[in-house]
Image: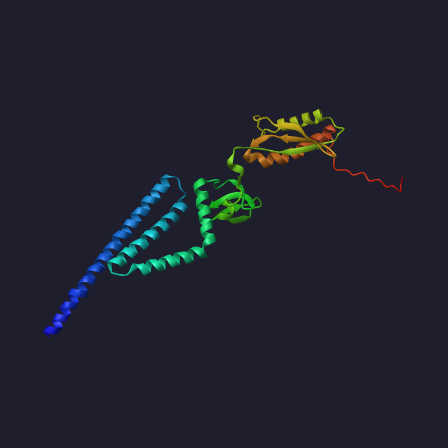
Amino acid sequence: MDILNSIDNNMINEYVIPWSISLVSALIVFIIGRWAAKLIVKGMRRVLEKAGVEATLSNFLGNIVYAALLIAVIIAALNQLGVDTTSVLAVFATAGLAIGLALKDSLGNFAAGVMLILFKPFKIGDFVEAGGSAGVIENITVFNTVMRTGDNREVIIPNGQIYAGTIINVSARDTRRVDLVFGIGYDDNIKEAKKIIEQVLAADERILKNPAPLIAVGELADSSVNLNVRPWVKSGDYWGVYFSLLENVKEAFDAKGISIPYPQMDVHNPKAA
């Protein structure tokens, strides 16, 4: 009986008590570490919010940082239990490499999404030409951008495809220039045609006075004298003015007898001669 009691006391002193202390230490490290990780992430999100970073990006980065801190806390807790963390780190490293290779494209889209959100080449509501599509930006996430086309289709474009190409933000400026070309016949009076166009432009209140519209001969083409017409308008009025000018100038030319020639080809038949 004394031998059994001695063995039990030895086991308690050598194994149970040290292991219990290690377990309590590990739990304390884990609890305090997790609390500290949450506190750090919370502070980071506040800093990002004050810096004007989008909430989507802030939350995503916060989750990544929290996961990394939590892994570090778990490894520290395992150390308290006497576990060899070298193999654990190797497993995490291998898993991270495998996940990185499997999600290479997704990580590329994420990196591009971070750049788009930070540098803001466009915002929600802008009309943009990017990634092979054109439309109004409806949503920007860390992985893709949602766009609505002019015919009301929804286009979802990976951010990597947008950031790697040219981005044309039509809405970035308050005003736009409407570029039109009107051809008149060689027998028509150029000054008269320019005067008619000036009257049409002056009658449209959407056309800005400053900068003044440009009306100039742009080309002596094969079948016509081409007049470049370039008025400035507010960006929101662009297409309305564009289509109106095409119709109004054509009607004004018809009323004043100014011709709009079309390509012609003279065919000579030697046999007929």
**Residue 215 percent across, percent down from the top left:** 65, 28
Residue furthest to the left in view is 2
Q: Is residue 141 visible?
A: no
Q: Which of 114 and 236 is in front in this view?
A: 114
Q: Is residue 100 visible?
A: yes
Viewed as shown, does residue 196 lie left or right of 62?
right
Viewed as shown, does residue 235 lie left or right of 46?
right
Q: Nearer the viewer, residue 255 or 268?
A: 268
**Residue 192 percent across, percent down from the top left:** 71, 25
**Snapshot colouring:** rainbow
Q: Residue at x 36, y 48 (%)?
A: 62
Please tell me in which quadrant of the rendered image residue 253 appears: top right
Q: How many labels does the image show?
A: 0
**Residue 126 percent across, percent down from the top left:** 51, 40
Residue 6 lies, with reference to residue 264, above or below; the image says: below
- Quadrant holding the C terminus: top right
Please tell me in which quadrant of the rendered image residue 266 appears: top right
Q: Which residue is drawn at 23% across and 55% down?
A: 28
- Quadrant holding the N terminus: bottom left
Viewed as shown, does residue 154 lie left or right of 84?
right
Q: Which of 157 and 83 is in front in this view?
A: 83
Q: Which residue is drawn at 25% across and 54% down?
A: 29
Q: Which residue is drawn at 37% across and 42% down?
A: 48
